[in-house]
Image (cartoon, grey):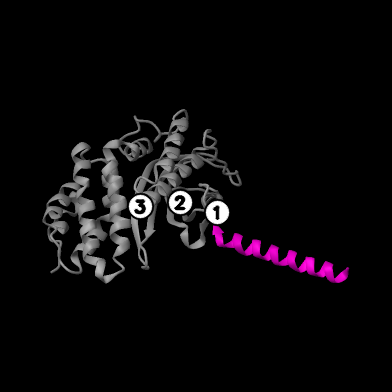
Amino acid sequence: MRAKFSHISWITCLSLLFCIYTNGLNAQELNAQVQINTQNIQLTNKQVFNTLQTAIREFLNNTKWTSENYSLEERIQCSFLINIQDNPSIGEFSGSLQIQYSRPVYMSGYDSPIFVHQDNQFAFKYLEFDRLDFAENQNLSNLTSVLAYYVYVIIGLDRDSFEEEGGTPFFQKAQNIVGVAQNSNFTGWSSFSGPKSRFQLIDDLLSAAFSDYRKCLYQYHRQGLDVMYDPAEQDRGKQVLRDALLLLKGVNDKRPNSLIIQIFFDAKSQEIISVFNGGNPIDIRALKELLPNLDATNASKYQQMGPG
């Protein structure tokens, strides 16, 4: 009897250890870095921001955002920088939120930036040790609604880069947050909030007029960058990148100077220049003509692009 009990106990222990190990291999979707900058406000006790920073990091990284299991190495790398500009009353804050997201390139140590954006209509209420709760169909807190909105935008962009229009379900979740939050007193959620609002961003991402932008994301990353680890495929990869970028002409023709095109080049301009300045030359005359029209800030760099 004793031997049988010991055997069962040993199997049970092994099972528990296996469960602990396999659970450790699975993680939530995000590996988000969070920083709060309070240099522009006067506040006697700034400990509240240390507490808030930890709470936001745990909210982003410990919430289950999708129905899928991500391994530790599959987690989406992103960062959230909050600049507090004003503290009009106790527990009320306003400022900006800067979000950055990069996607790993296959068989390389390089992360390709996809989303670099600053939201200047960021305001919220928070008292130290408040719980950060979120519900998809309720606006429990403007802080968690804004954070969840950008989480779904990031996951949607990540999926789009691996599968053509794979991010649609997550963009729809972000759009739903916009619809629910429009009844709040906070700005950034409505069509009247300006050309860089959260409403405008998700409207662009789901608009048929921007389908070629999303096709560009997939071709550029999955069919272009991801094959370039193989020296024999580098020229073909560059050609795919070129052709993917040329798709943006049709997008810009339909919606000139759109927010989504601005965001794309805020993330991609330096990468594009680096890719086409190195390696074997390919025909990029059409690209050098197009890019200055899409991203005037870097026009001179694009015109000089190509191996020296």
Label annotation for residue 38: 2
Q: Main secondary structure of the magenta part?
A: helix
> Which region shows up in magenta?
1-27
As rendered, which of 140 and 12 lies closer to the eye?
12
Q: Position of residue 217 (x, y in %)?
A: 30, 51
Position of the C terminus, as image quadrant, is: bottom left
Between label 2 and label 1, give the one nearer the viewer: 1
As rendered, which of 64 and 144 lies closer to the eye?
64
Q: Element type at marker 3?
A: helix
Q: Earlier in the sequence, mark 2 or mark 1?
A: 2
| Mark 2 residue type | Thr
Q: Position of residue 299 (x, y in %)?
A: 15, 53
Mark 3 and mark 2 residues within 8 Å of each other at the beta carbon:
no
Q: Position of residue 194 (x, y in %)?
A: 32, 34
Question: Image quarter for residue 281?
Answer: bottom left
What distance separates the C-alpha of mark 3 from that of mark 2? 35 Å
Between label 3 and label 2, give the one nearer the viewer: 3
Q: Residue 240 in magenta?
A: no
Mark 1 and mark 3 residues within 8 Å of each other at the beta carbon:
no
As rendered, which of 235 and 132 lies closer to the eye?
235
| Mark 1 residue type | Thr
Q: Would you name the residue on which mark 3 appears?
A: 161
